[in-house]
Amino acid sequence: MLTLAAIALILPVAFEAARGMTEESLGRLSGSLSVVLLFAYVLYLTFALVTHSALFTGSSVVEENKAPASVGRAASVLAVAAVGIAWMSEIMVGAIEPTTHEFGLSKVFVGVFVVAILGNAAEHATAISAALKNRMDLSLSIAIGSGVQVALLVAPILVLANLVVGPAPMDLAFSTGLVLIVFLAVLITGQVAGDGRSDWLKGAQLLVVYLVLALTFFLPSTSSTR
């Protein structure tokens, strides 16, 4: 699914550079791709939750003599959590904006690294907790699932919502640097998950790659403000 998302994000930039697409044509392409990505996300959820849910339970799950939560209760908890997350997001955005101006950080760096870390803090904590319990299958699925959700759900919804309520149409033609990061992330993810093994050196390498990318976006943004 990450490969599919990467292709959908790379194509608008490639066609814009090769053919010099107009803003209207780029908007139509982005809207069409957004619908396709949302359909792919529905297929992904059906695969993970309905037809092949056993593949995502992991091999170390311990059966407990507890009755599963009802659908109504689970939906209520998700609804309350969604409202709480939306409220916290507004607080976070309000706190980040003055900090961004104070330190002269670029919006790209804040959006790609700062907001990404803070916004997914709960998922990061869950993935780390699962890894500490030697549940690397669950930890990896959480990390990959987060990226799939952003690429196949959040981005397409933002594109389509901007056609109705946004101040201006939004397209999927991100900057070359951001598209390159997506492409590298897909390659690295495939290499890490391909052999089905994990060790501390792989983790250290991933942290180094993340630090390199962060410095690549951080240093030019700070030097340009001086």
Image: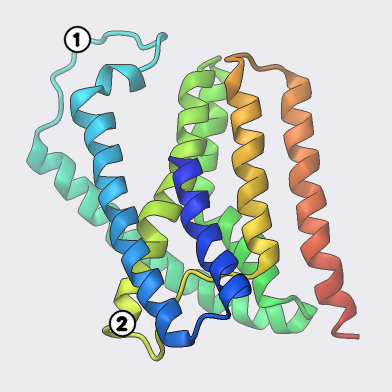
- Label 2: which residue? 163
Instruction: Pick the residue in front: 150 or 92.
Output: 150
Mark in front: 1 vs 2: 2
Q: Residue at x 78, y 30 (%)?
A: 204
Q: Is residue 83 above or below residue 143?
A: below
Residue 26: give x, y in percent of width and height: 45, 77
Q: In this image, 102 relative to 140: left or right?
A: right
- The secondary element bearing badge 2 is classed as loop
Indicate which disc residue 87 carries: none
Say what amino acid the circle numbered 1 marks: Asn
Q: Please tell me which residue is depicted at 49% across the width and 37% down the height of the picture.
A: 144
Name the quarter where the C terminus is drawn.
bottom right
Q: Which residue is mark 1?
A: 65
The quarter of the displayed image where residue 65 is located: top left
- Residue 15 point in image, percent of width and height: 54, 69
Q: Is residue 170 visible?
A: no
Does residue 34 appear left or right of residue 202 in this picture?
A: left
> Which residue is located at x 16 percent, y 49 percent?
76
Quadrant for the N terminus, please. Answer: top left
Q: Is residue 205 above or below residue 116?
A: above
Q: Are marks 1 and 2 in contact (CB under 8 Å)?
A: no
Q: Which residue is rendered at x = 18% and y = 28% of the image?
A: 50
Observer able to see residue 38: yes
The answer to which image quadrant residue 113 occupies is bottom right
Location of residue 54 in the rendering, given as x and y in whole percent from the top left corner: 27, 17
Mark 1 or 2, nearer chain start: 1
- Measure the C-alpha gap from mark 1 to mark 2: 49 Å
Q: Is residue 205 above or below residue 166?
A: above
Give the amino acid at mark 2: Leu
208 vs 64, nearest the viewer:
208
Q: Residues within 10 Å of mark 1 (few under 14, many from 20)?
A: few
Residue 125 place in picture, x, y as percent: 53, 38
